[in-house]
Image (cartoon, grey):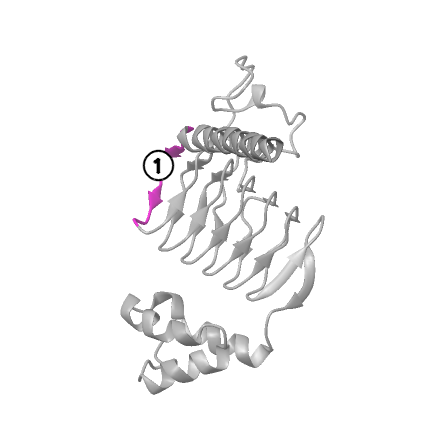
Amino acid sequence: MNIYVKFLKLINKLRNIFLIKYLFFKLLKKIRLIGIKNSYLHRTSKIESGTTFISSSMDKYSFCGYDCDIVHTLIGSFCSIANNVKIGGGKHPIDWVSTSPVFYKGRDSVRKKFSKHERDKVIKTHIGNDVWIGEGCIIKQGIKIGNGAVIGMGSVVTKDVEPYSIVGGVPARVLRFRFSSDLISKLMKSEWWNLDDNILSEASSYIQNPDLFLEYLKNKSVSISEK
């Protein structure tokens, strides 16, 4: 019996040690800084630590995971962006003699400048509303991702993504659409992501069924045609 008691105590001790280590790891992960510059972040949205967010905006109830790089990007409402996502990175001039930054204007990793030619202006990347971007995705500068789209983890997005499509791969391609074209049209017209929080709170009872959700909005006199 004493051996059994000692064994249980040892297990509990080890469990506490691993718990402390886990909590310490989480703390270290959380206390890292966030690099936000020239950007707008809605008060209901969140960016996790280790992420850089430059010259970008994020609307209501959206979030971005750990260790992301987001530059020159406009992000809508209710978006879910996983860890290690890269959006809207820089472009090197491929029609010049050289692609090296030592020949164009701006601060770069290499300090030497042989010349300071102007590059083409940065093209904003647009992420719609209710978009889910999986872990480790890379999204090229200037891409437009439609409302309700899903980007599979590890995808490299080099072309615009249609609303409510599910894309994946390198480069990303359409795998399927989330709903029928008729239902997608109705959801797009509803623009539910712009509705008042009180209406959304009531309508959320039907969030698992798009048809019932839209029917509820119709019965509440939330006119889809007026959106």
State the residue lying farthest toward the right: 170
In this rendering, the count of numbered labels is: 1
Q: Position of residue 26 (x, y in %)?
A: 47, 33
Q: Position of residue 102 (x, y in %)?
A: 57, 19
Dividing the picture into quadrants, the one containing residue 181 is bottom right
State the residue lying farthest toward the top: 112
Q: Position of residue 158 (x, y in %)?
A: 64, 49
**Which residue is at the front of the view, 199 or 37?**
199
Q: Is residue 198 left or right of residue 70?
A: left
The quadrant of the rendering that contains the C terminus is bottom left
> Height in image: 111 above or below 96?
above
Q: Is residue 5 left or right of residue 94?
A: left
Amino acid carrying mark 1 in the image: Asn
User: Which residue is at a point 51% across and 77% down the rendered structure image?
Assistant: 185
State the residue lying farthest toward the front: 1
Q: Is residue 143 visible?
A: yes
Q: Is residue 121 visible?
A: no
Is residue 5 magenta-colored?
A: no
User: Which residue is at a point 43% across and 78% down the rendered structure image?
Assistant: 213
Q: Which residues are magenta?
A: 32-43
**Which residue is at the front of the view, 211 or 3?**
3
The quadrant of the rendering that contains the N terminus is top right
How crowded is the residue under tag 1: few (<14 C-alpha within 10 Å), some, or many (20+)? few
Dividing the picture into quadrants, the one containing residue 222 is bottom left
Q: Report the residue marked by disc 1.
A: 38
Q: Position of residue 162 (x, y in %)?
A: 58, 64
User: Which residue is at a point 49% across and 73% down the rendered structure image?
Assistant: 208
Is residue 35 magenta-colored?
A: yes
User: Which residue is at a point 72% across and 48% down the rendered structure image?
Assistant: 170
Q: Secondary structure at mark 1?
A: loop
**Which residue is at the front of the view, 39 or 51?**
51
